[in-house]
Image (spheres, coloured by chain):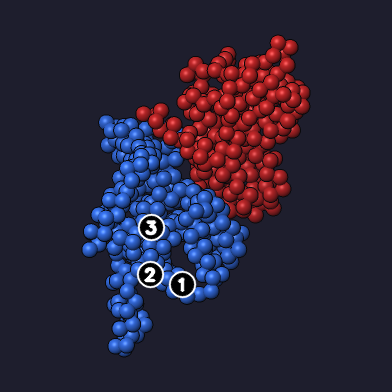
Chain colours: A blue, B red
Amino acid sequence: MQRSARRKRQGFLSPALWVPAGLALALLGLPLVALVVRAPWSQLPELLAQPSVGSALALSLATGLMSTAISLVLGIPLALVLARSAQWAAVPRRLLRALVTVPLVLPPVVGGVALLLLLGRRGLLGQFLPFQLPFTTAAVVIAQVFVAMPFLVLAVEGALRASDRRFETAAATLGASRFTIFRRITLPLVFPGVAAGALLCFCRALGEFGATITFAGSFPGVTQTLPIATYLQLQTDPDAAIALSLVLMIISAAALVSLRDRWVPGVTA
Amino acid sequence: MKRALVTLVAAGLLLAGCSAAPATQPTPEPTAEDTLTGTVNVFAAASLTETFGAIADAFTKEHPDVNIAFNFGGSSALATQIVEGAPVDVFAAASGTTMKTVTDAALTDGEPTVFVTNTLEIAVPAGNPGGVSGLADFANPDLSIAICAVEVPCGAASKTVFDGAGIVAAPDTLEQDVKAVLTKVELGEVDAGLVYKTDVLAAGDKVEGIEFSEASTAVGKYPIVQLAASTNKNAAAAFVAYVLSPAGKKILDRAAFGTP
């Protein structure tokens, strides 16, 4: 039934819309095509074999996985609160939603400055820390969580809103505790949304540049992630920068293609 | 290959909000009375932001019909944009290497002139919390240190002074430009950073400067040149002449730039 509804929708798509849609697709896709076409394929193995590339890639993958894990642990509960906030008064509900969404639209450099002012050596909280957070790998992870967690929260929240609450009610009447309901009913129901959100979150963390270089700095093996290494290479060796960009793009594309049509759970799932 | 990338980057930079993006409309030819008019597009190194702004103000007081439009940025990025065909009348770079990118492409009108020099200086947060006294402190792993990455001009200059002094620096971060190093010092996130004298002066009270003798081994030279493709040659030439004039030099001296 869902499929026939979809076909019906497509039947109403005016041919006049294909032109702007095609332009939009070209704007999104052609730069990436150019990157692939102009990549220095013959020197690629040599460029990617540099030890600095390996260490930047390893650091990016490790911090990306770590920040995705933290986002899962903190973000799913936040998504539950956000989904529940539908019953709140308008002002706190909108404030909460804005707080979760702001990192998505904020220039990441601004996020990095804000993190410095909070957690830096003279920051609001940072001055009380017994250790210095900036210029550490932990700072990279914090910057990535700040920028990437909203993707997970909003994806999971969408799935929660679309899920059937009656299963939870039924479980409750059968005597399940609230945490059991969360673990055995809610979480499995929204699993596609969690998976999609985690992948988006990981890809965003992988590409994080502005907040990281501002808050965590740039030092090989400690804070210099792949996007930062790419930017620095651009100053002296554009071919190497293209090679690094290609690696980032392939990892992100592979992760996103594996999402298939679970992009926005609650709409298509 | 480079071209596609560089175009992408240039577009990205423009999108990212180079607030002084150059005006692209053709500028009118100067009139017969030799009064200067139109727009002069000036691409200049980020470290010239304050001084060139002041010079433009003084220049346009003498030539009220001329509009000076600036694009400030990292010299290497600016050089790349010029090679890629950005509409520009005057280019002032922070290093000979970046200027060479443009002269090698045969885009200049005549030879560049070195108009100022800049020397490295140690910058510490106000009050010098790390107790830094000289270049040797940069080897202390207990201090938090920021320097420029070796890929950018200030990093190359830093490497020269460290190599010359036989010091193995222990930086905590290698920043992408000199202003990023300065920011880390201003915020007190690092105990010391290596920046230019002019940056220390521009930062005001938040930063203290410490001169060191080894700085003389890496004096940065700033060349300026008019571009062959300039569409407003007379006004552009007048602006370059003004930068080199005693009036221009006075403004540059005030900002702690050195005389070549």
Chain at numbered mark 1? A
Report how far apart the C-alphas of labels 3 and 2 lie in the structure.
Answer: 20 Å
Residue type at tag 2: Arg
**Residue drawn at the location 64% of the way across and 16% of the way down:** B29
Are discs 1 and 2 located on one and the same chain?
yes
Judging by the rendered image, the residue that carries numbered circle 2 is A161
**Residue drawn at the location 30% of the way across and 54% of the way down:** A9
B18 sits left or right of B255 in the view: left
Judging by the rendered image, the residue that carries numbered circle 1 is A86
Give the answer, above or below, for where A243 lies relative to A73. above
x and y, in percent, of residue A3 in the image: 23, 59
Chain at numbered mark 3? A
A253 sits left or right of B4 in the view: left
Give the answer, above or below, for where A193 lies relative to B93. below
Binning the other alpha carbons within 10 Å of mark 1 as few (below 14), some (14 to 19) or many (20 upward) gives: few
**Quarter-of-image position of residue B239:** top right
For the N terminus of chain A, the image quarter is bottom left
Q: Would residue B224 be seen by someone viewing this image from the given angle?
A: no
Binning the other alpha carbons within 10 Å of mark 2 as few (below 14), some (14 to 19) or many (20 upward) gives: some
For the C terminus of chain A, the image quarter is bottom left
Under circle 1, the secondary element is helix
Report how far apart the C-alphas of labels 1 and 3 lie in the structure.
Answer: 24 Å
Judging by the rendered image, the residue that carries numbered circle 3 is A201
Between A136 and A178, the one nearer to me in the picture: A178
Cβ–Cβ under 8 Å for marks 3 and 2: no
x and y, in percent, of residue A118 in the image: 57, 61
Between B112 and A17, the one nearer to me in the picture: A17
Binning the other alpha carbons within 10 Å of mark 3 as few (below 14), some (14 to 19) or many (20 upward) gives: many
Under circle 2, the secondary element is helix
**Quarter-of-image position of residue A155:** bottom left
Under circle 3, the secondary element is helix
